[in-house]
Structures are given as structure tokens and as C-alpha cells.
Image (cartoon, grey):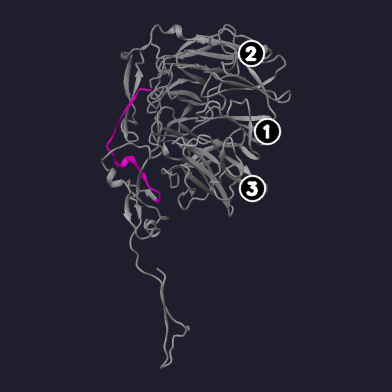
Amino acid sequence: RSTDYGTTYEKLNDKVGLKTILSYLYVCPTNKRKIMLLTDPEVESSLLISSDEGATYQKYRLNFYIHSLLFHPKQEDWILAYSQDQKLFSSVEFGRRWLLLHEGVAPNRFYWSMMGSGREPDLVHLEVKTVDGHAQYITCKMQNCSEATRSKPFPGYIDHNSLIVQDDYVFVQLTSGGRPHYYVSYRRNAFAQMKLPKYSLPKDMHVISTDENQVFAAVQEWNQNDTYNLYISDTRGVYFTLALENVKSSQGLEGNVMIDLYEVAGIKGMFLANKKIDNQVKTFITYNKGRDWSLLQAPDTDLRGNPIHCLLPYCSLHLHLKVSENPYTSGNIVSRDTAPSIIVASGNIGSELSDSDISMFVSSDAGNTWRQIFEEEHSVLYLDQGGVLVAMKHTSLPIRHLWLSFDEGRSWSKYSFTSLPLFVDGVLGEPGEETLIMTVFGHFSHRSEWQLVKIDYKSIFDRRCAEEDYRPWQLHSQGEACIMGAKRIYKKRKSEKKCMQGKYAGAMTSEPCVCTEADFDCDYGYERHSNGQCLPAFWYNPSSVSKDCSLGQSYLNSTGYRKVVSNNCTDGVRERYTAKPQQCPGKAPQGLRIITSDGKLTAEQGHNVTFLVQLEE
């Protein structure tokens, strides 16, 4: 254990017991002082708990084998533990005592309830197997999950491994007649079937994001194999409209589906996606959550300063959008909440994305312009909120140098970090916001022990940044400053200043823009025509909404447009494009039938005839 950022280490074997074999280490996400170590269950099943950042430990025996843990997002001592035999346990004492909640819980289908309102923080959502092998969605309290106290928010059974609880939404899937149907509940209200365009026949769906009261989902149609379509919903998550077709997908190592879509950190509403067009894959960017997509403008010059001739739309910059699953190596693309506007990615220039000829590119203006920085793949780390970028070559050979940039990747200088070349296995960036420390770990030869190299960049800076070292930077999309209905101005360090930023102030000012047609998507059932107007699609009858309502009630009469939920524009065309509540229309009577009581349409003279009059509506 090291308490000085890895300069010196103290051996802790006697603190945990000499014969103990450890298998896993957890740090409590809401209180970093609390640490839990799991022992190897093949030797003994127990927990070691520390409340002083790992200096001392207490040992607790377990009567089950832990497969995974889920910490509560707010309460530091509340934990759910999933055992290797599909039982779910809960603890309110940071693992010192456990209570069996339920048996037959589906793997990874248990969730803490995190509603915006924060009511019922001790509610747990589970997908469980019934005695006859069906799957069911239930909720119960973490200390009591008896028959009497649990509830079943979704009537009937659901498909196996289909429960998802995220932010304000709960999703389940139910297959009938060979086709999956998807249901959503918003803020714990009754479930409604998710509505895609009528012609859509989905066979698979992935929820991509649920923040800002809107669902972004990827749907695979019956005729798609290696692509998905992106859809975006209304607030309730019921009505979905198309955002982008044919986004590339691939199988991950564990059979999981990876969709080539990347959400840029630090800038809300900004995504990159790889779309397949006629067997070519091209990279597109959106700043308004998928309403408008454009290709990436390639750099003007290469590394040597030679001009690059690359004309849109025939030629553009294409990026690999795979995110790393391993926390110690960077993926193909990186961005950070604390360094909005800086994106580093690997890719190529041309008519399509290619797996050969990969270079590294950086953008320091949120994807509007790009610069080439290396001709081979590198891992790039952000230190001091992007004030320092560190690059190391991706290679199976041993290396001794790394590259540093203090001006958002415009210029790079070479430093050596080890006298003997090191096979690099991974890099850990700074643990705190304040420090400028990174640790490289690897080995000198295949037979040698692990080596840790600590690199501290503090000495490079002689001062902290002051107010005059910053400049305002306006987020824009090819010159258009109103994005998602607001002008956003960030504070950026002037690139020529060499000072240390320290804590991230999150400095951003935003002022709303006047609403224009560009702030509105087409509403459910409407499609954008070449002149930019949203008109009813062939499969949609706008008057069907009013047909479903009864006299005295009101319904929302769509204008054909809807605003992206998190768009903050004001006035302008807002009034004209927003759906208006209208009274349900009175209906013409229909279904009048007249018959005689004996069913005949003839009558004898002198006899009474009884007529029966029926009116359906």
C-alpha cells in the first residue's frame, strides 16, 4: 500500500493474514476510505473490510461465494451481493452482515432504485425465475423481500435477461408470435408498449442512454445483420423517431453487441457514429442528439506539413469508436468531462473507415477541425484536465519514451521515462484532480517481475493558472453557435500558457437562443421532406389520435414537430411548432339499425308491430 502516490510501498501481508489469497478489491464509490477485499473462495470464503483506506482490516466469514457486488449510489454502507448460485444478498453494514433477499435472480439483472425524486432509496428491482422457469420483474425492500411485501410492476412474465432499470426508466421485453415487443415505464408509472414506426420489425434493441429525460436506443431491424438504427424518444420513452440508419455493430469478446456510437464527454448532445453506406463505413458527427449529422472535415495538412487534398463529401476523416473495456489501456477514442472540446482518436482519411493505415488525430474545438498527431496508434492520457496530454506508442515491443503536449496536441516533445526499455502493460492516470502523476506498469523481460514507474509532471510547471491565463471558447458546429437551443461558452487555458490548472471549475456559461425550425425534430409519425417540412409518413394517419378519445377529454394535436427534450431554446417559432391540447371532437352518430321484434320486415294488417332501434354510437 502506498500513501505518497506510489513513491514508497508498505507490505501488508501480515495485516490480512499470511495464508490469505486475495481475489478482488472493491473501493466504496461514495466513500473512498472504505475498502473491501475478497478472498479466493477455493481456499476460504471471507471478506476483509477496511475503513481507513486500507491500513487495517477486519475479517468476516461468508457462507456464500460472491460473484459480483453492487454499491448503493448514495448510501455508502448499502451493498447488494450476487452469489455464484444466483442468490441475491443485501447488507446495510458494508458487508459485515448479509441477508438473503431472493433466489433465482438473473445475472446482472438487479438494480438499486434511483428515481429523480429519491423516494424509496431502499427499493431493489430484480428479474427472478419462477418455479416453472419463467422470468418475472419484481421490486422489494432491501431488508425484506417476503411474498407479502414485494410487488410486480409488470403484469405477467417477461423475456429472460430483459429487465433494464436506468435513471427514470424501466424496460422489459416480451416475445409473442415470434416477435419481441418492448415495454417502458417512466418514473414508475404503468408500462406502455414502445412505439417505433409502423413498418419497423425489430429483432433486437439496446438502450444507449437515458439521461436528460429521453431515451436513445439502437434497434436492429429484421433485415439487418451488422448494423442498427438509432432512435430517439419523447420524455416518456414511448414514441420513437429515427435519428440515424445503419450504424455499424460488431460482436464483443463475450458475445456482447458493440455499436459504433460514441458519446463525447463534457458536451451534452454530442455523438460520433460509424454509418454503413453501400458497404463503406463512414464517420458522422452530431451536436444536437441526432437531429443533424455531418461528415468530419479532414485536416488540411499531414504531420510533415504537406497539404492533404480531401474534399467533402467524397473524402473525409473516419474514426474508430471502440472504447476500452480495460481501465489500464485507452481505447481508440478518448474524451473527458473535465476537458470539454478535446477529443483524441485513431482513424484514417479517405472515402471510408479502414483497419490499415491508422493514424492518431486530435480535435481541440469539439470535432469541427482535426489535426494529425502520430502516424501509428498511441494510447493518450489526459492530465491536469487536458492541460497535459501524454502519448505512448501501442506496440508489443519494449519502449523507453513517451510524448507530451501542453497545447492541446498542437506540438509534442519526447521524454524518456526509463533507462531500460519496458514492455508496457498499462498506464494509470492521475488519481486526483490536483495531481500530475501517472504510473506506468510493465516488465523488462517476459521472465521478470512487474515494474512500476512513477512519473510526476509537477516540476514542469512553475505556477498555478490565474484568471488571465484563460480565454473564453464558444462551442459551435461549423460556425453555428446555437446548439441544442443555447450558446455555450467554456473557459479554456490559452495554449501558449504553461501553468497548472488544478481543480476543474466546470466553467461554462450558457444563454438560450431563439427557437428556429432547426431546434425541432419531426414528431412521431412524421418524416422530413426535401424542403425541410415534417409531413405525415405513409403509414401514419394524424386524425387517428383524436379518434381514440372521448367527448369532454382533450388530446395533444401534433404540429408534426417536436423539440429535442433537452433543447433550451425560447420564443421564436416555439409556439407555432409545439403541440396544442384540443378538445376531443364530438362524433357523428353511427351504426343505426332498425328491426322488428319478430325479425320480419312484413306486417299483417290490424296487428301491432314493435320496432327495435339500435344505435352503436
Question: Which image quarter: residue 85?
Answer: top right
Where does label 3 land, which residue? 134
Query: Could you tell me residue 325's position as x and y percent?
Result: 56, 27
Sequence-wise, the earlier of marks 3 and 2 is 3
> Looking at the picture, which amino acid does disc 2 mark?
Trp
Depth check: give the residue in front, 33 or 439.
33
Disc 3 + disc 1, Cβ < 8 Å:
no
Depth check: give the residue in front, 115 or 496.
115
* Spatial separation of the CA atoms under disc 3 and disc 1: 20 Å
> Looking at the picture, which amino acid does disc 3 mark?
His
* Spatial separation of the CA atoms under disc 1 and disc 2: 31 Å
Where does label 2 land, which residue? 450
> Looking at the picture, which amino acid does disc 1 mark?
Gln
Depth check: give the residue in front, 410 or 549.
549
The residue at the point 51 percent across, 17 percent down is 429
Point out the stretch of residues depicted in magenta.
Answer: 506-525
Depth check: give the residue in front, 179 or 587.
587
Q: Residues within 10 Å of mark 1 (few under 14, many from 20)?
A: few
The residue at the point 65 percent across, 13 percent down is 15
Query: Could you tell me residue 229's position as x and y percent?
Result: 48, 43
Q: What is the quadrant of the C terminus in the image? A: bottom left
Question: Which image quarter: residue 293?
Answer: top left
Disc 3 + disc 2, Cβ < 8 Å:
no
Where does label 1 land, which residue? 84
Q: Is residue 280 visible?
A: no
Apparent side of residue 414 relative to residue 175 in the rendered image (left or right): left
Q: What is the quadrant of the N terminus in the image? A: top right
Query: Could you tell me residue 304's position as x and y percent?
Result: 43, 17
